[in-house]
Image (cartoon, rainbow, N blue to C red):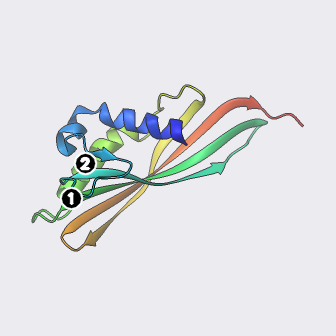
């Protein structure tokens, strides 16, 4: 999972439009005093996907976009998600130890937390490690 997480971070921070929107605030663990808006890599789940005699896995990665209630509803969060999708959806991430199959947007949903707006987006990442399974 670590190599996939690093590749997603690299893809996101390489998008200058996204960096303009979040001012480079993309975190694994956000500081308690972080300014809005910011993006947090949340839960990741790895599922074994051995197939056709090769080892592989699927990762489900959730990102949470935090914005302040600013009278715009979820506008800012949706603009951030649009740029994240430009970087991740239907893309191959740069991996060194594995062969990237695809990264695709799976779903997104919105939530209100007092004076914050949270948009959560989940991506599915399919990876092969090119190792033949021998029986």
Q: Residue at coordinates 22% horizontally, 53% vertically from top-left?
A: 34
What residue do we see at 57% from left, 34% from top?
A: 101
- Horizontal side, residue 57 vs residue 74: left or right: right
In this rendering, is residue 119 above or below 61?
below
Q: What is the CA distance from the residue labelled 1 to the residue labelled 2?
A: 10 Å
Q: Are marks 1 and 2 in contact (CB under 8 Å)?
A: yes
Indicate the secondary structure of the residue bearing disc 1: strand
Q: Residues within 10 Å of mark 2 (few under 14, many from 20)?
A: many
Looking at the image, tell me whether mark 1 or mark 2 is earlier in sequence order.
Answer: 1
The residue that mark 1 highlights is: 67
At x 66%, y 32%, the residue is 129
Q: Quadrant of the C terminus?
A: top right
Considering every residue shown, the one lying at the far front of the view is 32
Is residue 59 shown left or right of residue 52?
Answer: left
Q: Is residue 32 above or below residue 95?
A: below
Q: Look at mark 2 in the image and give the residue it sits on.
A: 80
- Tell me where residue 79 appears, x and y as whole percent: 22, 49
> Looking at the rendered structure, which numbered label has been put on residue 96?
none
Residue 115 percent coordinates (x, y): 18, 70
The residue lying furthest to the left in this view is 71
79 up-or-down from 3: above or below: below
Label 1 neighbour load within 10 Å: few <14, some 14-19, many 20+? many
Q: Secondary structure at mark 2?
A: helix
Residue at figure coordinates x 67%, y 39% from the top left: 56
In-image side of 74 versus 56 (left or right):
left
Residue placed farthest to the bottom in the image? 114
Image position, residue 105 (x, y; %): 43, 48
Q: Is residue 127 left or right of residue 131?
A: left
Placement of the N terminus among the 4 image quadrants: top right
Q: Nearer the viewer, residue 2 or 132?
A: 2
């Amino acid at each position: 999972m670590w190599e996939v997480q690093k590749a997603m971070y690299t893809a996101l921070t390489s998008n200058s439009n996204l960096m303009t929107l979040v001012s480079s605030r993309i975190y694994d663990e956000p500081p308690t005093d972080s300014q809005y808006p910011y993006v947090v890599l949340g839960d990741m789940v790895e599922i074994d996907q051995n197939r056709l005699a090769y080892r592989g896995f699927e990762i489900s990665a959730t990102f949470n976009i935090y914005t302040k209630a600013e009278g715009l509803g979820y506008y800012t969060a949706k603009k951030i998600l649009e740029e994240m999708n430009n970087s991740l959806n239907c893309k191959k991430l740069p991996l060194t130890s594995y062969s990237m199959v695809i990264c695709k947007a799976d779903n997104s949903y919105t939530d209100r937390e007092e004076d914050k707006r949270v948009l959560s987006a989940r991506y599915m990442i399919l990876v092969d490690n090119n190792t033949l399974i021998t029986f």
